[in-house]
Image (tube, rainbow, N blue to C red):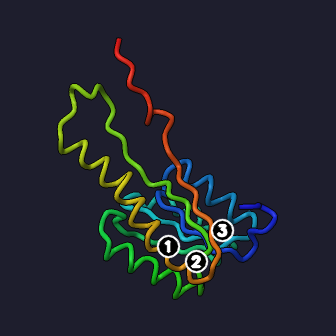
Amino acid sequence: MDHRNLKGQVILITGASGGIGKGIAKYLLDAGAKVALHYHSNKSSLDEFFENEEYRENSLLIQFDNKVEKDVKEAIKLIIAKFGKLDGLVNNAGIIERGFISMQNAEKFDAVIQTNLVGSFLVTKHALQKMIAKKKGHIVNISSVAAGSGQIG
């Protein structure tokens, strides 16, 4: 997305309560975008957005589980109801289980896959439907540099 053309654009950021998500949100809001700030459980880290009148006016704080399709659909409906459209998506929500893979269990692995892959798929699917209808939109997927590390020793 060209930062010079962000004024009035409506963008959903998943995982907005973390450091990268908050940084992206601030950048977009400062550039004139309207931002839907997704969080799963850490709402208090987003309080600062609502202390700033301009941010408060141009933000929607939205809690949903990105792994649950009905929650994602409802969240997209709320964004459209507030802002009238959806122009972009930043898939930033993600979790990581630290430690050696040999020490992990299937439940922890499944939680990572569900949040990081299935969640991103579901949010993309439903956001994309709105963008296709307008024949315009942008999607950015954030990943970790640790995603490819598999070194032993």
Q: Is residue 22 above or below residue 103?
A: below
Could you tell me residue 45's position as x and y percent?
A: 49, 56
Q: To which residue does mark 2 refer? A: 86
Mark 1 and mark 2 in contact? Answer it, CB < 8 Å. yes
Secondary structure beneath disc 3? Answer: loop
Which kind of residue does numbered mark 1 sit on?
Ala
Disc 3 or disc 2, which is closer to the eye? 2
Q: To which residue does mark 3 refer? A: 52
Q: Residue at x 40, y 57 (%)?
A: 42
Crowd around label 2: few <14 · some 14–19 · many ≥20 (10 Å): many
Which kind of residue does numbered mark 3 sit on?
Asn
Q: Is residue 56 left or right of residue 43?
A: right
Q: Residue farthest to the top? A: 153
Instruction: Please state, as top left, top right, bottom left or bottom right, where the C terminus lies in the image.
Output: top left
Q: To which residue does mark 1 refer? A: 127
Which kind of residue does numbered mark 2 sit on?
Leu
Secondary structure beneath disc 1? Answer: helix
Q: Residue at x 43, y 27 (%)?
A: 149
Q: Which mark is residue 30?
A: none
